[in-house]
Each structure stands twice: as C-alpha cells, then as structure tokens.
Image: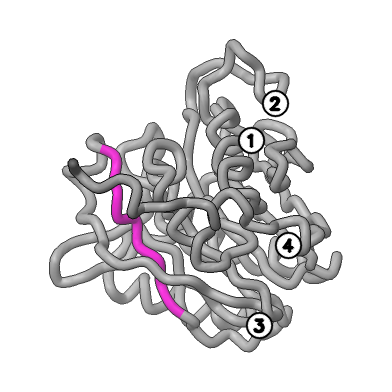
Amino acid sequence: MIIALASPRVARSLDEGLEKVDRLLSEAAGQGAQIVCFPEAWLPGLRGQDFEVLEYGPREEERVLRAVAASARAHAVATILGLERITAEGRQIAAVVFDAAGRIQGWQTKNQIDPTEDRYYVPGNTRQLFEVGGVKFGIAICHEGWRYPETVRWAAVRGAKIVFHPHHTGTHHAGVRLEQFGSSSAPYYEKAMQMRSIENTIWFASVNYALPFQESATSLIDPSGRCHAYLPYGREGVLVQSIEVEKATGLLAARYAPERYRDS
C-alpha cells in the first residue's frame, strides 16, 4: 500500500488552503498514493497558536467539504483532512475521511483535547475505524497520540494496520530549529511516535504543519518502532511511502488483556 503525508505551510486564505490541498493531492496521486493525510485542524488552522486562523463558519466549512471532495475525486485518492467541525455544542477538532470517489466515509473527532484548547473547542465522544483498499486504519489527533496511548490501542485491537496522527507542534515566529530525528535533546514527540507503533506492532503515520520552528517531523514509523521516513523540518511537501501492510501484525495490541485490570 502506498500512503502519503501532506505537510503544508499555514494557509493565508481559504483559497490558498484549498489550492494547497489540491496540489498536494495531485503530487501524491502522481506517485501512486492511495490515501493522503493532512495535519490537525489545518483548515482554518489550529486556534491558540502564533499564527492567524482563517475566518471560518458553516459556509466556509461547507465550501471546504465540497472542494476537497472534488479534489479527492479528481485525483482518485482517499483523503484525510484535518479541519474544524462546527456543531451545536461548539467547535470541534476533527478529521474527515473521503474515499477516492470523494464520498465522505466518516469523521474522527478529537476526544481528548489539550487543556490549552478548552477555551476554543469542545471534545467529541466517539471513535471509529476506516478502510481503504481492504486496509483498516484509525485516527488519533495530536494530544491523543502523545498523552493518551489508549486512543491508538483502541484502533489496533480492532484490526487497524496503521493509525494516522494529524498534529501540530512547533511555532511560526520563534523557536528552536531541530536537525536530527529523535534527538535526546528534542521534545519528546518523536519518541512518542515510535512508542505508539512498537507498543501495538502497527504502522504509525504522524503529520505536522510545515512550520519554521517544528517540534516534530512529519514521519512514518514502522511496526518495530523504527523511523521509516520523514520530511525535513520546516519544508512544505508530501511524504509518499510504500508500506508492507503484513508487517503490522498487531501482536502486542492483541495481547492486551483488560480483564486483568479489574479493581480488587
């Protein structure tokens, strides 16, 4: 299976954002990708960061869904788009999944939100698996994959071969520039990526914004916890990789025994 992780820079307008989605989908599809994942809340941008979030209401949300459905259909590639979902309860961080015909297959909300996000978003409360080309996958969004490993295991014990992890770490205007993946002096994020794969024996695909001061790379981690490939820090682009699905045995996830955690 060929997957792609799209890492765009912050969009300065909705027009620019939709153009980037279409361009990166085209580039990924041209390299044979069957599915492409974008970062967390990439449209209109994750609130509470050091960049301006685009104006975004129900009309903009509907425009994004129509446009991305058309791009997925035009390039015949399944698409996971990190975006903001507007509900009666409030704004949610979510990922919407389109199939290669541009049909919406479902949504995964961010159910464990970071404490700093409480002022902007409300959490979701359901999880689901998705499937492309006979391969099951799950989605864990940013904070979930870093600090709530059970969100990844939830998918793994149900047969997911890969979990996609749209996220945002880093800053736009000032910070430290990383140079080496997994450095002991870097933030813990890349080490957490490796743990999510090895503790479940699955592929873990983590995709960040292309930021001037990234704190984690857009990365693909194999089921042994090894970094299979990553994009250079700060560079906009799409990481296209072929994965051996059969290596995702889910062995360690399958040995999870919740009945052994009963209160005595």
> What's the residue type where badge 3 is placed?
Ala
Q: Nearer the viewer, residue 129 or 11?
A: 129
Q: Residue furthest front?
A: 264
> What's the residue type where badge 2 is placed?
Phe
Q: Which residue is mark 4?
A: 3
Residues under numbered marks 1 and 4 in contact, where contact means CB atoms less than 8 Å apart = no
Q: Is residue 196 visible?
A: yes
Q: How many C-alpha atoms fall within 10 Å of the one at disc 1: few (<14), some, or many (≥20)?
A: many
* Residue at point 45%, 44% (across, down): 145
Q: Does the magenta segment cover residue 10?
A: no
Residues under numbered marks 4 and 3 in contact, where contact means CB atoms less than 8 Å apart = no
Q: Residue furthest left?
A: 89
Residue 98 occupies quadrant: bottom right
Q: Specify the segment rendered in magenta.
A: 106-114
> What's the residue type where badge 1 is placed?
Ala
Q: CA distance from mark 3 to mark 2?
A: 32 Å
Q: Does the magenta segment cover residue 109?
A: yes
Residues under numbered marks 4 and 2 in contact, where contact means CB atoms less than 8 Å apart = no
Q: Which residue is mark 2?
A: 181
Which percent across, then down, holds residue 179?
71, 19
Which percent across, then down, holds residue 241?
80, 55
* Residue at point 30%, 55% (across, down): 111
Q: Which residue is mark 1?
A: 217
- Does 195 sit above or below residue 43? above
Q: CA distance from mark 3 to mark 1?
A: 27 Å
